[in-house]
Image (spheres, rainbow, N blue to C red):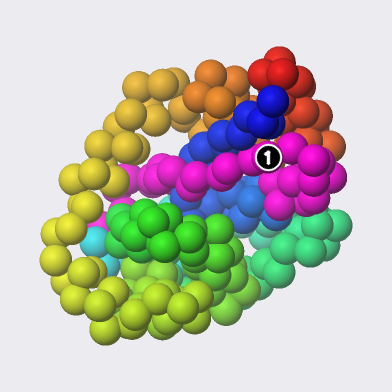
Amino acid sequence: MAQSTVTIDMVSDVICPWCFLGKRRLDKALSLIPDVKVEVVYRPFFLDPTIPAGGIDRTKYMTDKFGTERLKTIHDPLIAAGKEDGVPYNFDAITRTPNTLDAHRLIRWALPVGKQAEMKEALFVAYWRDGKDVGDHAVLADVAASVGMDREQILADLKSDNDKQTVMAETVQAQQMGITGVPTFIINHKYGISGAQSAKVIADAIKKVANQQV
C-alpha cells in the first residue's frame, strides 16, 4: 500500500518573527521524520491588518505598540531562540513595517512552480536578516528572481490585482477557523499546532497523524 501524504498548512505572516522561527523548526521537524511523506502549503495571515499599503516607519510602529521601555527587551526571547535554531534576526536593520498583501501574493504564485518553501524562506531572510522592505514591488521582484522566477513577469503581476481578493479571502477563512495568532500549523486539515513549537513537538504530531492514516 502506498504511503499517504500528510498535508501541513502553515498559516503565517512574513513580518511575524515567531513565524520565521516556526518555519525553521518545521524544516528541522521534517528532517527528523524522513520516512513520512509531507506536503507543506504556506497560507496567508495579516499580523496587523491595519498597516497601510505603503507600510509604516518601524521605530514609530513598535514604539506606539509596545512603548519605549518594553521595546528595549522585547526581542530578547526571539534573539535567544534564533541563535539556538539558526534564525538570523537583525532587528536593527529593519526600518519599515510593511503591508504584506503583495508578499502573500508572491508566496501564492510560487506554489504551482514548486518554489513556495524557497520563496517563504527568501522573504523571511530579506526582511529579518537584510532589513528589506518586503512591501516594495522591486524588492519582491528581486526575491522572486533569487528563487528562479521571472522578475519582469512578477513586477507586471504585482502591478495588477491578481489574487488580491483570493489572499484576502484566505485570511478571513483563517479567522473564521479561530486562528488568532501565528504561526499555526494545520495537519491534514483538522489537527492544529499553535505557536513556534519545538521541532520535536511538530515532528511527533506529524508522525502521530501519519500513523493514523496507515
Q: Give residue 24's position: percent from left, percent from top.
A: 70, 54
Quadrant of image for the C terminus: top right
Q: Which of 201 and 132 is in front in this view?
A: 201
Q: Which of 211 and 62 is in front in this view?
A: 211
Q: In the rendered view, would you say 100 is above or below 131? A: above
Quadrant of image for the N terminus: top right
Q: Give residue 86's position: percent from left, percent from top.
A: 79, 64
Q: Describe residue 92's horizontal placement relative to residue 52 as left or right.
A: right
Q: Describe residue 173's horizontal placement relative to residue 67 as left or right.
A: left
Is residue 19 magenta-colored?
A: no
Number of marks drawn: 1
Q: In the rendered view, would you say 92 is above or below 206? A: below
Is disc 1 surrounded by few (<14), some (14 to 19) or many (20+) residues within 10 Å? some
Residue found at x 46% / y 27%: 179
Q: Mark 1 points at which residue?
A: 37
In the picture, residue 157 is in which quadrant?
Answer: bottom left
List the single residue furthest toward the top.
Answer: 212
Name the secondary structure under disc 1: loop
* Segment colored magenta: 26-52
Q: Give residue 202's position: percent from left, percent from top.
A: 74, 35
Q: Give residue 207's position: percent from left, percent from top.
A: 77, 28
List the single residue furthest toward the left.
Answer: 160
Residue kind at label 1, given as amino acid type: Lys
Question: Can you see residue 194?
Answer: no
Residue found at x 39% / y 56%: 112
Residue found at x 35% / y 22%: 176
Q: Describe residue 124's horizontal placement relative to residue 1 as left or right.
A: left
Question: Can you see residue 20?
Answer: yes
Residue found at x 74% / y 46%: 30
